Image (cartoon, grey):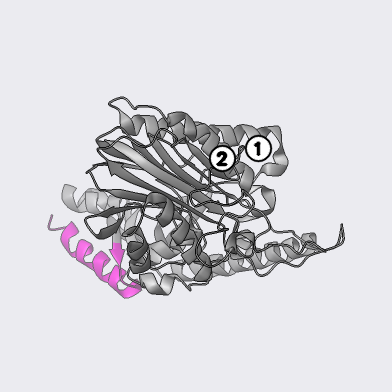
Amino acid sequence: MYLHYSAISDVGRVRRENQDSGYAGPWLLTVCDGVGGAVRGDLASSTAVQALRKLDQEPDDDILGQVAGAVHRADDRIAELVEEDPALNGTSTTATVALFDGTRFGIGHIGDSRAYLYRRGELRQLTHDHTFVQSLIDEGRITEEQSRTHPHRNLILKALDGIRHEEPDLFEFPAEPGDRVFLCSDGACGTLTHDRMAEILGTGTPDFAAVELVRASLEAGSTDNVTCLVADVSEEAPPEDLTPLLVGAAADLPRRLPLGGAVGGLFRGHRSGDTGEIPPVPDDVPEGAYVADPIDPEAARYAPRDPGRHAWLRRLLMAAVLLGLGWVVLAAGWSWSQQQFYVAEDGGKVTIFRGIDASLPGVSLSHPYEVTDVELTRLSDIDAEQVREGIESDDLEDARLTVDNYAARQDVD
């Protein structure tokens, strides 16, 4: 079987630059969403895609091994960039990869970009988001619908950053003629509902569906970059002019346009508008002038924060608060321990200890409180061993009762 594919990436209505990157070819589909904010998320995503696109050739039998190796190489390449330029520390990218061998797909995934399968009229999400809100959904604390407006909906837990070397999710599934595979950045899936995506994916060619998905995302209010890759599985060979597509930050050549128009206007001539050309930054702003961005949740959570003025004072106050809290905890713990009692051996005699039967390096957590005249040598071997191991007591009276029981048995045993 073969892939008939299309790929589109749009900067969107708000952002000044596109930090998404995508690639679609006869064997490979991949989307990367840079999450570096001020530290060049576009560089992270384009670097990852340039490494991953080398997978675009007929795979061998170990399809998942090839995907995992390519993801790790992309992570290593980002690590090299950070090592060469420490100012890039903090840049990272999501990565969703679909490698096709003619009969099946091998999927690699890390972050919150997504892969979907549209089969026989039903849409199924294949990947699982590595995000904070997804963990809340998994725990049953919020619904999928609530996650779309959650204040921390953009907080991702795993990404390729060249530092943590996270392991991607890996799995494969068999392909069928008529399958439609959809990969996207969260600019699309974070805005469009499941039903709306299914409605669009059920119509038209891959070109048409990709354009409609981007348009629908922008019209639904997406404030992020939007990247959509759509591929159909077919028993018919694709047209000879269907060449690999590199889109977004990774694009180094003008992409072919699916529905006519110039390179500068992705949507020109398509339906009723040219939403792809809404300028994210006014053209008449004087050079060097400050342009205030709208609230950008992505940059706010991914980019390192400027410590601002008097950062040392804030750090000192925080350290003092933490030190005070630590002292309170230690004092409370010590006070509690001095209300505990247990029975053990001291100098060969049954002894009541005050504190807890434990120790820390260089710190004693208990001390003898009452030394009795009950000698271990006059107890049975079983009783003596129990005392040596220590016997917990509810309080001082309970400890004394334990001692009285052994005292009553020492002469008998």
Inspect the image, locate mark 2, and give the three-letter code of the amino acid beneath it: Ile
Q: What numbered label is drawn on residue 67?
A: none
Q: Name which residue lies at 37% across and 67% down.
A: 196
Mark 2 closeness class: few <14, some 14–19, many ≥20 residues within 10 Å: some
Pointer 2 or 1: first along the chain: 1
Q: Residue furthest left?
A: 412
Q: What numbered label is drawn on residue 163?
A: 2
Q: Name which residue lies at 34% across and 49% down.
A: 181
Q: Is residue 116 visible?
A: yes
Percent x, y of residue 253: 61, 37
Task: Calculate the distance from the C-alpha at mark 2 to the C-alpha at mark 1.
Answer: 9 Å
- Rendered view: 74 above or below 22: above
- 393 in the magenta segment: yes
Instruction: Give left or right: position of 172 versus 299.
Output: left
Percent x, y of residue 95: 47, 45
Q: Quadrant of the N terminus?
A: top left
| Of residues 143 and 136, the one drawn nearer to the viewer in this rendering | 143
Instruction: Give left or right: position of 145 versus 319.
Output: left
Mark 2 or 1: the one toward you: 1
Secondary element at image label 1: helix
- Rendered view: 403 above or below 11: below
Q: Please say if the residues under marks 2 and 1 sit with CB atoms less than 8 Å apart.
A: yes
Q: Which residues are magenta?
A: 392-413
Kindly report the secondary structure that dominates the magenta region of the rendered protein: helix
Q: What numbered label is drawn on residue 82?
A: 1
Inspect the image, locate mark 1, and give the three-letter code of the amino acid beneath it: Val
Q: Quadrant of the C terminus?
A: bottom left
Residue 15 location, quadrant: bottom right
